[in-house]
Image (spheres, rainbow, N blue to C red):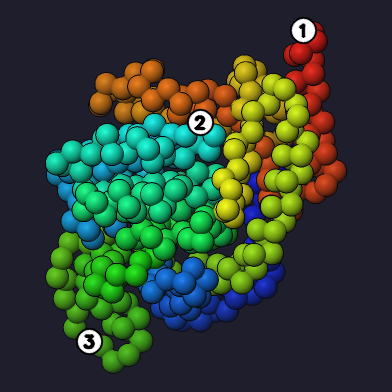
Amino acid sequence: MKIDFYKHNIESSDIDTADEVLKSLFLTTGQKVSEFETKFSQYLGTSHTIGVMSCTAALHLCLVAWGIGEGDEVITTPMSFCATANAILYVNAVPVFVDVEEGTGNINAELIESKITKKTKAIMPVHLYGQMCDMRKIRDIANRHGLIVIEDCAHCVEGQRDGVKVGELGDAACFSFYTIKNITSGEGGAITTNNDEKARLLYMLRLHGIDKSAAERYTKKYAHWDMTMLGWKCNMDNIRAALLIGQLERIEKLWAKRDEKAKKYTEAFKDLSGVRLTAEVPNSKHAHHIFTIGVANRDEMLTELQDAGIGVAVNYRPIHLLDYYRRRFGYKEGDFPVAEQIGSATITLPLYPKLMDEEQDYIINTVRSIITKRGSGQ
Ligand SMILES: *Cc1c(COP(=O)(O)O)cnc(C)c1O
C-alpha cells in the first residue's frame, strides 16, 4: 500500500469558483477576497479578517502593526514550526522561549510569568496540533503585564476551549492556508482582529502601505493613491480566495471526518505500551490538524513506516535546536527539556478526510506490528 501523508479537500465546485475568477478581469485582491474575509469573520465571530499570502506574513504584519521592534522581547514556544519565531526576528525583536506542557506540547502558561522582563511586549502562543492553549490564563497574564497576545492558529481554525474560540481573547490571530493545512489555497493566510484601528492599518501593511487597494484604484474611476507608511507585499488574491470560500463552508464537515479518524487512532493506540499519545484537554474542541504519536527510537520507526509505504512527518524538532537558532543564540540541548523530549520522539501519521478506512487500518496495524516486534526483542 502507498498512503500519502496528506490530501487536500479542494472539490470541483471550488475549481469552478476559481475558474470564474480566472475568466474574469480581476485576479488580484478584490471582491472574492472581501467575500472570503466576511465569511471567515462570521465563522469565527470576529470583527475583521485581513487576507494575506501566508501565516508567516500574518505573524510578521501583526508584530509591525502593534509596534513591536528592535530590542523588544516576545514570549513564544520552541515546539512549533520555525515561522513562529522567525516572524519575531523579522522585526528585530527577540524570541524568548518558554517550555511546553508534557501532555499537550502547548506553551506552559504556568512558566510564562518567570520569563517576563521590562522588555517583554507580547506573547505568541501556538495552538499545537489543533488543540488550544489555555487562552484564559494567557490573556490574564497579558493583562496584568500590559502585553499583546498574537495567536498562531496555523493548526487551529475550528478549535474551542472553555467556551473560547481561537482569536477571541488574543489581540490578533494568524491563520495558514498552506498546502497541508485544514483548509488550503496552496499558499495563503489571514489575520483576524476585533481592533478596528489595527485592522485598517493591517489592510495597508499587506500592500506596501498604500492607502487604496488595486480594486479601488482600477475598478472605479482612476484615483491617485499615496503611500503613507512602509508596508509589505502579501495581499491575498481573488484566485486563492475563490478556492477557500467553499472549503470554509464545508469546514465543520471536514473537521468531523478528522475527528472520527483521530478517535479511531486514539482507541487503537491507547493501551499500546510503547506509544505515547497527546493528552486531550477537557472542555475543549480539538481541531485535529494532525495526529502524532511519541515513540522510542523515533528515526528508526520513521524509516520503517516509510518502507511500509506510509507518508510521515515530524512536528516538530524544537526551534531552539535548529542550526540557525543554535548559532545565533547559543542554544543547546537541555535548554527546553520537555519540548526536546517531544521533539525527539514524535511522529505525525496521516490524518485527513480522504484517508480511507482500510488505509487507516493498515497504518494502525503497521504501527502495532513495529511496536510488538520491538517488545519481543526481534
Ligand atoms: C504552517 C505553519 C506556519 C506558517 O504558515 P505559512 O502559511 O506557511 O506561512 C506557522 N506556524 C505554524 C505552527 C505552522 O504549522
Residue 223 tag number: 3
Q: Which residue is mark 2?
A: 102
Q: Are marks 3 and 2 in contact (CB under 8 Å)?
A: no
The quarter of the rendered structure image containing the C terminus is top right
Residue 64 relative to residue 127: left or right: left
Query: Percent position (x, y) of residue 36?
Result: 49, 73
What residue lies at 28% left-to-right and 51% top-to-bottom?
142
Mark sitting on residue 181:
none
Q: Position of residue 206 (x, y in %)?
A: 30, 64
Other residues around mark 3 within 10 Å, as few (<14) / some (14–19) / many (≥20): few
For residue 198, above or below residue 298: below
| Amino acid at pointer 1 | Gly
Instruction: Measure the alpha-carbon separation of dots 3 and 2.
Output: 56 Å
Answer with mark 1 or mark 2, whichever residue precedes in sequence: 2
Crowdedness near tag 2: few (<14), some (14–19) or many (≥20) residues, C-alpha within 10 Å: some
Crowd tier of the residue under label 1, counting other residues whose Cα lies within 10 Å: few below 14, some 14–19, many 20 or above: few
3 or 2: tag closer to the N-terminus: 2
Closest to the camera, between mark 1 and mark 2, is: 2
Image spot of residue 146 (x, y percent): 21, 53
Please say whether residue 25 is visible from this viewpoint.
Answer: yes
Q: Residue furthest right?
A: 358
